[in-house]
């Protein structure tokens, strides 16, 4: 990005120098060649400027994403769901705006919000991440409960 800025400034300086020199050129052919060179330098500078504007726009979008995620992540707290399972749960004070839910710890670290769904696997009840099917164990079912596979909410 710095290189593009320097190239643009260099092209503008050269264009300015050429423009100053045009007034002293009396030969039509030389003047036309200088005009063409000046136009090339102006196009180079405009291209460098367009690249910089595009890059600035990309960076502004990235910064906005970070700021949005910073506000979003403050709404969650790392919670032990039992059996060594850690998830990020929506804070109690946020449940007036949105239903209580948990999100995946890996997704949280990648600034994504992937809501976990209640599910059962084998002898365990827990939460499952729909996208990758990651299962977070939250409790072990008793033999009688294993026949009833309806997940219960713990949060």
Image (cartoon, rainbow, N blue to C red):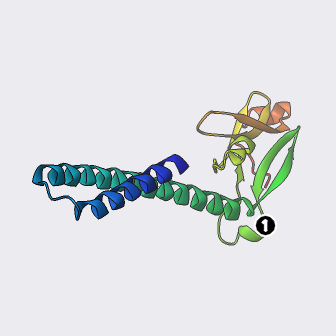
Examine the rendered structure and indicate whether residue 76 appears above or below residue 140: below
| Residue at 20% across, 55% down | 35
Counting from the top left corner in percent of width and height, residue 80 is at 87, 47
For the residue pair 96 and 75, the one nearer the viewer reads as: 75
Residue at 54% in and 55% down = 59
**Dividing the image into 4 quarters, which one contains the C terminus?**
bottom right
Q: Identify the image quadrant of residue 71.
A: bottom right
Which residue corresponds to mark 1?
A: 92
Farthest residue toward the top? Answer: 122
Mark 1, other Cα within 10 Å: few <14 / some 14–19 / many ≥20: some
Q: Using the image, determine if residue 7 lies above or below residue 67.
A: above
Is 37 in front, or is 109? 37
Position of residue 32 measured from the top left corner of the image (x, y, whole percent): 15, 52
25 or 8, nearer to the observer: 25
Number of marks drawn: 1
SS assignment at label 1: helix
Where residue 21 sits: x, y (%)?
28, 60
Q: Does 64 sit left or right of 75 as displayed?
A: left
Residue at the (86%, 34%) spot, across then down: 142
Asked if residue 1 can be seen in this view, the reply is: no
Is residue 61 rendered to the left or right of residue 98?
A: left
**92 relative position to 29: left or right:** right
Q: Residue at x 24, y 54 (%)?
A: 39
Q: Is residue 8 left or right of residue 96?
A: left
Task: Say if residue 109 shows up in the picture.
Answer: yes
Residue at the farthest left position: 28
Percent x, y of residue 37:
25, 49
């Amino acid at each position: 990005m710095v290189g593009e800025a320097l190239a643009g400034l260099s092209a503008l300086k050269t264009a300015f120098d050429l423009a100053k020199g045009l007034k002293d050129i009396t030969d039509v052919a030389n003047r036309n060649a200088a005009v063409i060179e000046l136009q090339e330098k102006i196009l180079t500078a405009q291209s460098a400027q367009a690249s910089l504007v595009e890059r600035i726009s990309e960076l502004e979008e990235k910064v906005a994403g970070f700021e949005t995620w910073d506000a979003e992540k403050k709404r969650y707290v790392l919670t032990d769901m039992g059996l060594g399972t850690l998830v990020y749960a929506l804070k109690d004070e946020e449940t007036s705006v949105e239903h209580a839910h948990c999100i995946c710890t890996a997704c949280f670290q990648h600034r994504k919000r992937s809501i976990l769904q209640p599910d059962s696997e084998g002898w365990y009840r827990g939460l499952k991440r729909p996208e990758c099917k990651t299962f977070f164990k939250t409790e072990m079912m008793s033999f009688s409960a294993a026949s009833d596979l309806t997940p219960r909410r713990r949060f």
